[in-house]
Amino acid sequence: MGERTVIKNQLHAEQSEADPNLSSVERIKKRIAFVDNQLKEIRTELTGLLNQDAEIKQLIKQLCTLPGVGLLTAITVVAETNGFELIRNKRQLASYAGLDVREKQSGTSVKGKPTISKKGNRFLRKAMHLPALAAIRCDERFKAVFDRLVARHGIKMKAVVAVQ
């Protein structure tokens, strides 16, 4: 997905020039089409793999019922957590993703503000960011949590991380 964005940006840059090179534009368009075909193949392959394992397919289906979570996000979460094999509760999942709160203290003199640890799985954190934004926008429960935290702290990103 990221590669496709880079290529589309290159296409935009080439087309925005005063005198765009038409052969370069065509080559870039062919690269975009090639990447699109690869993405279709990957999605087809993932769907085929899901159909082979009924247990994982059911787990993916349950995750897709959450607001903002689509097929690719659900597959990423299941893959990064190994099907939630070693995770027993939501605190373990938050810690594994690096979304747990870490307080910085040194005796009685130094007290820093709490931050997320980011010591967990960065792919899991990345996969949950956009679904959290979609859940805030579309689901009233998540929107209420977000609004309450923004009202308390005034920091929107902190509230988005809490929804993640």
Image: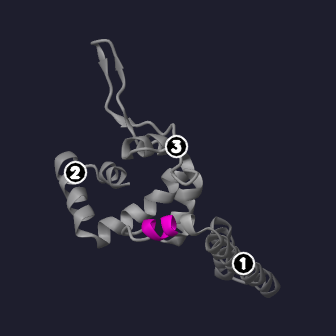
Q: Label for residue 86?
A: 3
Q: Label 1: which residue?
A: 41
Q: Earlier in the sequence, mark 3 or mark 2?
A: 3
Residue 6 appears in the rendering: yes
Residue at image point 29% right, 52% down: 159
In the displayed structure, 132 sits above or below 19; it is above
SS at circle 1: helix
Which residue type carries mark 2? Leu
Residue numbers of the magenta segment: 58-63
> Label 2 vs label 1: CA separation?
41 Å
Q: Position of residue 25 (x, y in %)?
A: 75, 83
Mark 2 element type: helix
Q: Amino acid at mark 3?
A: Leu
Quadrant of the rendered image containing residue 2:
bottom right
Residue 149's disc is 2
Packing grade of label 2 (10 A; few <14, some 14-19, many >=20) is: some
> In front: mark 1 or mark 3?
3
Mark nearer the viewer, 2 or 1 = 1
- Mark-to-mark CA distance, 3 and 2: 30 Å
Left or right? Give the position of 27 relative to 113: right
- In the rendered structure, which amino acid carries the disc numbered 1? Glu
* Quadrant where the N terminus is found in the figure: bottom right
- Work out whether 92 lies above or below 128: above
Give the mark, 2 or 1, whose residue is nearer the N terminus. Answer: 1
Query: Magenta span has 118?
Result: no
Q: Are marks 1 and 3 in contact (CB under 8 Å)?
A: no
Quarter of the picture containing the C terminus is bottom left
From the viewer's perspective, tell me whether residue 29 is left or right of residue 145. right
Q: Nearer the viewer, residue 54 or 152?
A: 54
- Quarter of the image for residue 52 reads bottom right
